Amino acid sequence: MAQRIEDYGIVGDLHSVALVGRDGAIDWLSLPRFDSPACFAALLGGPEHGTWRLAPASGGPCTTRRYRDDTLVLETEWTTPDGTVRVIDVMPPRDDVADVVRIVEGVSGRVPMECDLRLRFDYGSVEPWVTVGDPVTAVAGPDAVTLDTPVAVTRERGGVLHGRFEVSAGQRVPFVLTHHQSFEPTPVRRDAERLLEDTERFWTDWMAQARYDGRWPEAVRRSLITLKALSYAPSGGIAAAATTSLPEMLGGERNWDYRFCWLRDAALTLQALVGTGYLDEARAWREWLLRAVAGDPSDLQIMYGIDGRRRIPEMTVDWLPGYEGSRPVRVGNAAVSQHQLDVWGEVLDCLHVAREAGLAPTDDAWTLQQALLHFLEGHWDDVDSGLWEVRGPRRPFVHSRVMAWVGVDRVTRAASRHAVLDGPVDRWRALADRIHADVCAKGFDPERNTFTQFYGSEGLDAALLLIPAVGFLPWDDPRVVGTVEAVQRELSEDGLLLRYAPYADGRVDGLPGTEGAFLACSFWLADALHGIGREKEAEQLFERLLGLRNDLGLLAEEYDVAAGRQVGNFPQAFSHVGLVNSARHLSGTVPATEVPERVDRAAGSHGDPHAPRAEERR
């Protein structure tokens, strides 16, 4: 059985990510890319589905582990009766092949060690043809792997490559696993120590660019590294998570593949990176976006492959039993075909933030933005599936309409402020006012003093907390305060926040079962409490959320309050984006150029019949 989700750390090379457990086992790795079939899939099954354990022969979890400073160099230590040993894990920045480098370092005494490598390609279903030599080679179809180490390795029952050795204080024993295409020449031997040095230098140089002077530097810096690790260097795409089918409910069937580039998640990730000094990533993603949506922007998908491909067919991998029996295991994601109106607004907002932060506008980028806005002009009032990808009927979701307004607003601002960006500003401004009035008239419940999940709904949605954050209404508007209070009251689970109430409005999401508290939404709640003046409560919630990270500073998608465990895919970009942005907001380090101007609709302007009079404000 796999370990708890929070028992894993990660290493990555900006093409893929490996999950390394406290027992020294790599239980998940897709090669050569995030979305490739896994060659280590024990995370979703057992050792027979692929794993690589490198640890003391006595077994058991590590004593301590840590990342080396501001890098993705993972150090895992065991203190045993025979002495102390350290395993250093890295995936060096990719050149023409993928490497996993593991170096065993003796710290004290003389410790017996074991290496058990079980390669199983295609999500644990294909056992490779193995030749034990110098180096060891394993081939299965298009995939080939070499293992280069001075340790003698034998092939044991079940196809396990086994090595036993001892390491003394000051001794270092390298293992280099290299993946390449089987029809290409075997790569030249790799120097493990040099690869380690290159990896440490890369991450140190990258983190030197970070700008954050707030109160939680360690948490923010680790989250930035995690977000960078989820980026795909060749294209600029950003994966939502490194895994598939880690369950939102243990033992349930809410298990999805997140190894793709959601436009929404990527846009929010880029906003966090831009806000901390990383314009190169924003530039690369903008180029990825232009390629991915080339042709007809009205045919915008909610997600794409990390290389920009459009087709992500969903299938079940029935030979894998799933994490703790959570079936089915899914590969691909059928939500790719959903219509989610908010994505247009997220993309336009991200491009706006990058432009205001100093990313020079281009003709192609502005042409794309105009095309996206042209689509919104005719479709802002579409019913859609909402940002939570509900698999029930389409609805007029309030958040979707708010983000349509955001998209129109940001393009209008750009054309008003930048002479090189032209467009029918008056027409766009009138459209923004029309959308705003519609949302306030139909998406707000005056009796409960709260916006609702969709027009006419009795349910609420954590995304409503973003209404003031995007500038739709000011923080001190009574409707905002009422919405924050209602969302906290009705969607809280032991102080953390659900995305929505699954059973509201006749089970809005069309799925069985429930799920854990959504971590990104809980960070939004911290921001919202701070925004309405409840600063102490906001900081208490933020500190509690920091306490849910594992010992390496990593977060999954959700948290199961009853079980006291992280659940959902891991590590999750959305959660780390929430952490970074909340830390910046609560620290007061968000530049004025990044904060949307407060839109005052409370005087009844712009045709808003439900706006309260000034004397009714709190």
Image: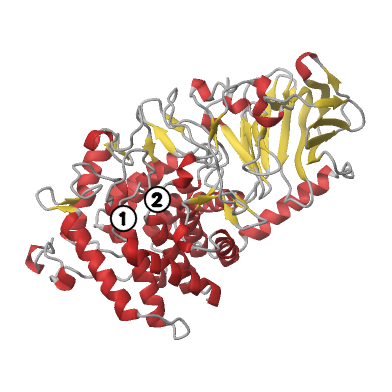
What is the secondary structure assignment of the residue under circle 1?
Answer: loop
Q: Quadrant of the C terminus?
A: bottom left
Q: Residue type at mark 2: give it.
A: His
Mark 1, Cα crowd under 10 Å, few <14 / some 14-19 / many 20+, is some
Mark 2, Cα crowd under 10 Å, few <14 / some 14-19 / many 20+, is many
Q: Picture coordinates of residue 8 (x, y %)? A: 58, 33
**Above or below 285: residue 100:** above
Write down the residue under mark 1.
Answer: 382
The Cα–Cα distance between marks 1 and 2, rounded to whole angstroms, is 9 Å
Q: Which mark is residue 257?
A: none
Q: Picture coordinates of residue 337 (x, y %)? A: 46, 46
For residue 532, which quarter of the picture? Answer: bottom left
Q: Residue type at mark 1: give it.
A: Asp
| Residue found at the very far right of the displayed protein | 134
What is the secondary structure assignment of the residue under circle 2?
Answer: loop
Q: How many marks?
A: 2
Q: Picture coordinates of residue 531 (x, y %)? A: 28, 58
The reply to whether residue 174 is in sight is no
Query: Looking at this view, is 369 or 205 the one in front?
Result: 369
Visual colour scheme: secondary structure
Q: Picture coordinates of residue 586 (x, y %)? A: 37, 57
**Considering only order in the chain, which callout, 2 or 1, is on the residue closer to the N terminus?**
2
**Above or below 182: residue 420:** below
Q: Quadrant of the N terminus?
A: top right
| Residue found at the very far top of the displayed protein | 157
Judge left or right: residue 239 versus residue 595. Answer: right
